[in-house]
Structures are given as structure tokens and as C-alpha cells.
Amino acid sequence: MTPDFQKDVILSDYTTICLGGKADNFISCATTESVQETVKYSKENNLSLQVISGGSNIIFPDEGYRGIVMKVDIKGISLKHENGKAKLITGAGENWDETVRYTVDNGLAGLECLSGIPGTAGATPVQNVGAYGQEVKDIVKIVKAIDRKTLDEVKFNNEECNFGYRDSRFKSSDKDRYIITEVIFEFDIKKEPEIKYPELKDYIERSSASLVTKSQIEKLNFIRESVLSLRKKKSMLTDPENPDTRSCGSFFTNPVLKEDEFKSFEKTAEDLNLKFPFYRTGSKYKIPAAWLVENSGFRKGYTENGAGISSSHSLALVNRGCSTEALLELSEKIKIRVKEKFGIRLMTEPVIVKNI
Ligand SMILES: Cc1cc2nc3c(=O)[nH]c(=O)nc-3n(C[C@H](O)[C@H](O)[C@H](O)COP(=O)(O)OP(=O)(O)OC[C@H]3O[C@@H](n4cnc5c(N)ncnc54)[C@H](O)[C@@H]3O)c2cc1C
């Protein structure tokens, strides 16, 4: 049976960066069975298939997509308590920020710093979503998915997801193989909220309210609101009224350098008389990509051919009336400049879709 496709759907309407032409076939799948049926149809009819959820980390080509775009819309959220743990079971299509709010309102610590990230629960394991000192990898218990090769329903435990910094098997080794249908997050119900990220810590310390006297739910809500305020200032909350949020959030990941690469970068920066921030992660060094972008000559607000850099965050490339081609040209230009000046290769964070 032919799935109920919508024809010639404008993809820019489904992405936060508002880019992309028409999809030949578009379908919203609200059940695991409809995901399986659509995959089966795409295989039998030799049509390529691209999965989309909230569209906040994906860029489609100007010419659109020749094949099927499948939007995962599986809903459902429930909470189970077992042996001092709480299990949150979420359909992949649940709105992420609503999911975080639900955990906060239930007094569960672990996702509160991920407030305000656009998109869906099912997409969070794909790039191990993270912000303000938290990552989903710390809380993900099970990821359920449909294997596009076999159409079987499969389950991955935390270790099997191969999580890394903005990475997992779903983004790298098994890119486009699995369609996530459900995620189970596990919380230790006795866990107190922890604030690790210096900027958030400072913000909370500077605010008049003390966390000590608050209940668990009040603390979590306070942290959530603080994160939302910080994100708002950087245009990192989607807002149709704010053109700086027509983006995919950060466009580049923060480079992680080995000792010898770090020494060479340090020498380059010294020769240029530049002081730079960095963070140790084990034996490696994380350099803020925002610093590299700014110090290679691309300031906040910079625009060419309608593609620009957000005026409140130098890592967000924004659509100020551009095409996908113009946006990708700007990103290449930035990458080349950073490589020439600092010898560091920036990596693109959002998924850039191509027609096969
Ligand atoms: C303003 C703004 C701020 C942001 N801030 C952050 C941040 O702080 N931290 C952060 O990590 N990210 C951030 N992002 C990026 C983005 O919100 C996250 O990566 C989010 O998880 C993407 O979810 P989505 O549902 O929109 O996925 P989409 O953009 O629809 O898809 C992204 C990728 O995941 C795949 N995918 C989506 N759903 C599924 C599924 N069910 N099964 C298999 N594959 C799937 C898609 O095929 C695609 O490859 C930000 C984006 C914006 C616009």
C-alpha cells in the first residue's frame, strides 16, 4: 500500500533556519508501524528517505529533496518509579523542551540545563545534545529504533549508543541506519541538581535568590529559568520575532585538540599576540569555536548574500534572506579563514542533506 504522502511540501517551513526547497514526498509518521511501512515502501520503490523531526539541526538543499522526507511524530510520555530510580519513557516526536519541563516539574534532576533546546526527544541521542554542563548521554538508558536495513525494532543501551561530544553511532558509524522511535531516560530520584558550568554558576550566584532554602522542584525550576534567560540573551531560543534565531544553533562544534595540536595552536596564538580560552577534557584541549570564528575576522552581525552571523552569538549562522548555497558558502569561507589563520579545521554541527 502506498503511504499517504503529501506532495511538493516546502521544507523551509519545517526547519528553524527556514531553508530548503520542496520534498517530492512528505509524510508524518505517528506510529512505529507507519515508520516501518514507509521504510519498506522506500526500499521497494528505490526512493531515498530522509528523516526529520523538529528541523532544528538540519539543512536541506535549495533544489529540495528527491525522495521521501519522513517526519517522526510518535508521541507519548510516561514516568515509572522502580527501586529508587525513575524511568521517563518518551515517544521520539515529543517536544524536547516540554519533556525537560515535565522532568523538572516532577523533581527529577539531570536534564534541567538542557532547557530551551529546540527539537524533539528522539533526536537528542543523535548528537548527544548538550548545554550548560549537561549532556543526554548521562541520563539515556535505552534508545528504541527501527533498523532501516531489516525493518526490525531494535534497542540500544547507553553504552551501545557510542556517545561522544556532539556525537553517537546514530550520527557517525550508523548514520541514517536507525530511526529512533522511543527514548527511555533514567533518573536517580535522590539526585540533587548540580551546576557545573561556570557561566550558569555565576549567573545563579549573582541572582538574589539562594538555592539552599528551596525545595527540589523549586531549585530545578530556578535552574531551568536561569538557563532560559541565558539562552534568550544569546538568541539560542527559537523565537519567530527574533531573526537571529533563524538558525540551527551552533554551526560549528568546538575543536578538541591533542597535546601536539594544542602546542602548535598555542604558538600561533602567541605569535599573533592573542589570548585564548580553553578547557581540558582528559588529555585533550577544547577550544571555543566562537573564539576562532571571531578572531579570524568574522564578527557578530556580519552578513553576505543574506547569510550571516547572529548579532548575539558568533557560532550561529543565520538566514537573513539567503539560499542554502549562500549559507554554505559563508560556512566554507569561515572554515578556510580559521584553518589559514590558526591551523584548525572546524567541523559543521548541523546535518547537511544532499540528494543522492
Ligand atoms: C536556536 C537553537 C539552539 C540550539 N541549541 C543547542 C544546544 O544548546 N545544544 C545542542 O546540542 N543542540 C542545540 N541545537 C541543535 C538542535 O536543536 C538539536 O540538535 C536537536 O536535538 C535537533 O532535534 P530535531 O528534532 O530538531 O532534529 P532534526 O533537526 O529534525 O534532525 C537532526 C538530525 O537528527 C536526525 N533525526 C531526527 N530525529 C530522528 C529520529 N527520530 N531517528 C533518527 N534520526 C533522527 C535527522 O535525520 C538529522 O540527521 C540548537 C538549535 C537551535 C535552532
Image: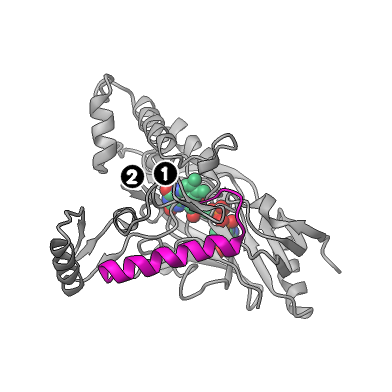
Query: Which stretch appears magenta?
Result: 318-343
Helix, strand or loop at mark 1 = helix
Residue 327: x and y, percent? 54, 60
Label 1 CB-ligand 1 distance < 8 A: yes
> Which of the labelled discs sits on residue 114, or is there none?
1
Residue 108: x and y, percent? 40, 37
Indicate the quadrant containing the C terminus: top left, top right, bottom left or bottom right. bottom right
Decide if residue 239 is on the left or right side of residue 196.
right
Q: Is residue 260 visible in this depiction of the protein?
A: yes
- Of pointers 1 and 2, the one earlier in the residue sequence: 1
| Other-residue count near label 1 (Cα within 10 Å), few / some / many at <14 / 14–19 / ≥20 | many
Q: What residue type is labelled 2?
A: Tyr
**Labels 1 & 2 near each other (Cβ < 8 A):** yes
The CA span between labels 1 and 2 is: 7 Å
Label 2 CB-ligand 1 distance < 8 A: yes
Does the magenta segment cover residue 42?
A: no
Indicate the quadrant containing the N terminus: top left, top right, bottom left or bottom right. bottom right
Does the magenta segment cover residue 332?
A: yes
Q: Is residue 144 visible in this depiction of the protein?
A: no
